[in-house]
Amino acid sequence: MKEKLSSFTWLYSVSIFICFMPFVSPVIALGAGLLFSFAGIKLKSIHSYTSKVLQFSIVLMGFGMNLGEVISASRSGFVETAFSVILVMTGGILLGKLFRVEKNITVLIASGTAICGGSAIAAVAPILNSKDYQNSFALVVVFVLNGVALIIFPLIGWHMGLSQEVFGNWAAIAIHDTSSVVGAAATYGDQALQTATTVKLIRALWIIPLSIIIALFNKNETKKSIRFPWFILFFVFAILFSNLLPAYHTTYGHFSWLGKRGMMVALFLIGSNISWKEIKQSGVRSFALGISLWLLTSLGTLFILTHKI
């Protein structure tokens, strides 16, 4: 037994090291974790650190955000963004009840759809104290839809003759992850890329108020106390600190990189700690929820943007 445990420790150590390689994407990290799980390669002692790795990674990524861009983006389109985030979250929760999806998975998928995909899910998961399989399902749904959107959105845009500005806004609102938004918009054109990046930044900032709101509603059933997301305050502090003391710009870049790589480690750990039983428990319904919410968001946003007076 000790020999087997030692072997698993070695495999996990190597895998975590590989997560820091530039070719490892969120899909690869989560997929590798799932392969470990299905092969029966599990190391319970390390999974207790998953939540901490997620929170630490979120904070470190704050060092990579430009305060000037954050403030500028916050001033433009604030009302529209607030309205769309509230609408998507509400729609997601209602659809979750319709499809009888677990509450945590519903909130995670709705948060990822409303704001910025995997980053929003990673920020909200520790607040909900959600289980690994719940986080995994939400992430799988988001990653699959991201891949689909990255391919079909530019094709739809060209077919409909959408302007650069309209496409940029549509991509930023309807595509989950920032990386996929940037990829689709860059394919469509430079102006679309600039518009999409700005709008997506505004949406990403909603991680903070949404996390606080979820914390207020997510009371511990035994203690009836609020689980306040303190790491979100450290995230804000990281943004302020890195911009008020710009002399250490290179160091902040390293911190931001470490946060992004740490996210890959967290995704690997999440994937490696789920089981077939948990997949059967929520898999089909989770995808039904995610796809339905994504289609409603995409089609609704496209209709509004193309029928503006």
Image (spheres, rainbow, N blue to C red):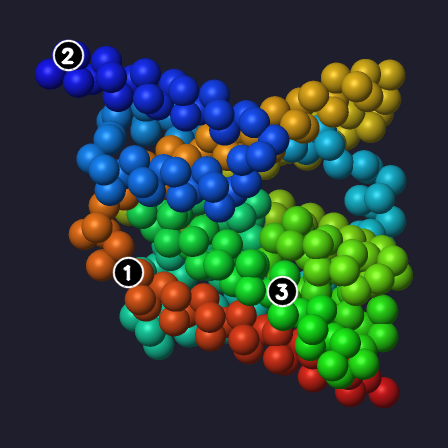
Query: Label 2 amino acid?
Result: Lys
Q: Secondary structure at mark 3?
A: helix
- The answer to which image quadrant residue 272 occupies is top left
Image coordinates of residue 267 in percent, x first then y, are 44, 38
**Which mark, residue 33?**
none
- The answer to which image quadrant residue 287 occupies is bottom left
Query: Label 1 amino acid?
Result: Ser
Judge whether residue 136 can be spotted in this image: yes
Q: Secondary structure at mark 2?
A: helix
Give the labeled residue for mark 3: 151
Q: Is residue 275 left or right of residue 235?
A: left
Q: 177 above or below 170?
A: above
Q: Nearer the viewer, mark 3 or mark 2?
A: 3
Earlier sequence position, callout 1 versus callout 3: 3
Closest to the observer: 29 or 254?
29
Q: Secondary structure at mark 1?
A: helix
Earlier sequence position, callout 3 versus callout 2: 2
Give the labeled residue for mark 2: 2
Using the numbered discs, state the Cα–Cα distance from disc 3 to disc 2 in whole angstroms.
47 Å
Image coordinates of residue 94 in percent, x first then y, are 43, 73
Determine contact: label 2, label 1, CB under 8 Å.
no
Disc 2 packing (10 Å; few <14; some 14–19; many ≥20): few
The N terminus is located in which quarter? Answer: top left
The C terminus is located in which quarter? Answer: bottom right
Give the labeled residue for mark 1: 282
Q: Nearer the viewer, mark 2 or mark 1?
A: 2
Residue at the farthest left position: 1
